[in-house]
Image (cartoon, helix red, strand yellow):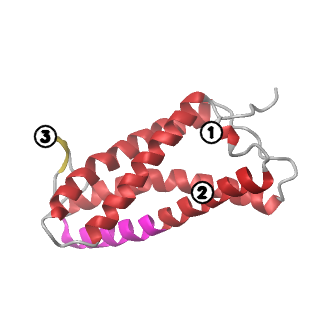
Amino acid sequence: MSAPSRFALPARMLHWSMAVAIFAMLLIGVGMVSTSSGRYDALLAWHRPIGIAVLVLALIRLAVRFTHRAPSLPADLPPAQAFAAKASHWLLYATMVALPLIGWAMQSAGGYPVEIWKGLVLPPILPHDIVTYGLLRRAHGVIAYLFFALILAHLAAALYHGLVRRDGVLRSMTG
């Protein structure tokens, strides 16, 4: 059985809906770390539920990834680029799951509730501990920068395939 020429419809829908949510998360996160004004609380109120939504969508996406074959990479792609493509995809999945979980754990350790919307508060996943909170806060920031770098590399690779190589890789997710 040959590989499909494009990703399955659920994978494409998840990809683009998550792209919007993750882009919003990154902008909100940058806004949160660059302000000490009253906007911080409002930004955090958006950051938490969108982060949990990204976590849920990432888990669904992983399930789709394991149940639907992905298109093959072009046969003429150099092995180093093929390896980088596969490794970066798995790193993207890992960060899409790790960042929200670390954020949730950080909030739990800090004693802050993770309110999804009014009246729906997630249970803490760690006991209150200010040292753990500090460590997780640092990890959350470092992994967020890694995630941002991965997204930029992913975007650059997509444009390279779509505009330079024109090998169908970009079309497999847009078509």
Q: Is residue 161 above or below residue 31?
A: above
Side (left or right) of 158 relative to 48? right
Please provide percent x and percent y for residue 113. 16, 52
How far across and how far down the image is residue 53, in percent? 35, 42
Label 1, residues with CA under 10 Å away: few <14, some 14-19, many ≥20: few
Q: How many marks?
A: 3
The amino acid sitting under disc 3 is: Lys
| Quadrant in the picture for residue 145 | bottom left
**Mark 2 is on which residue type?**
Leu
Residue identified by numbered label 1: 174
Q: Secondary structure at mark 3?
A: loop
From the viewer's perspective, is 45 left or right of 8? left
Q: CA distance from mark 2 to mark 3?
A: 35 Å
Classified by dominant secondary structure, the portion drawn in magenta counts as helix
**Residue 87 seen in render:** yes
Label 1 amino acid?
Thr
For the point 61% across and 52% down, the residue is 89
Q: CA distance from mark 2 to mark 1?
A: 13 Å
Magenta part of the protein: which range? 129-145
Image-based side of 121 in relation to 8, left or right: left
Image: 132 above or below 121 = below
128 or 86, which lies in front? Answer: 86
Give the side of residue 81 with respect to residue 144, left or right: right
Mark closer to the chain start, 1 or 3: 3
Using the rendered view, name the quadrant where residue 155 is placed.
bottom right
Q: Secondary structure at mark 1?
A: helix
Residue visible at 50% across and 37% down in the picture: 14
Based on the picture, tell me whether residue 136 belongs to the magenta stretch.
yes
Residue 95 rendering spot, x and y as whole percentages: 48, 56
The circle drawn on residue 118 is 3
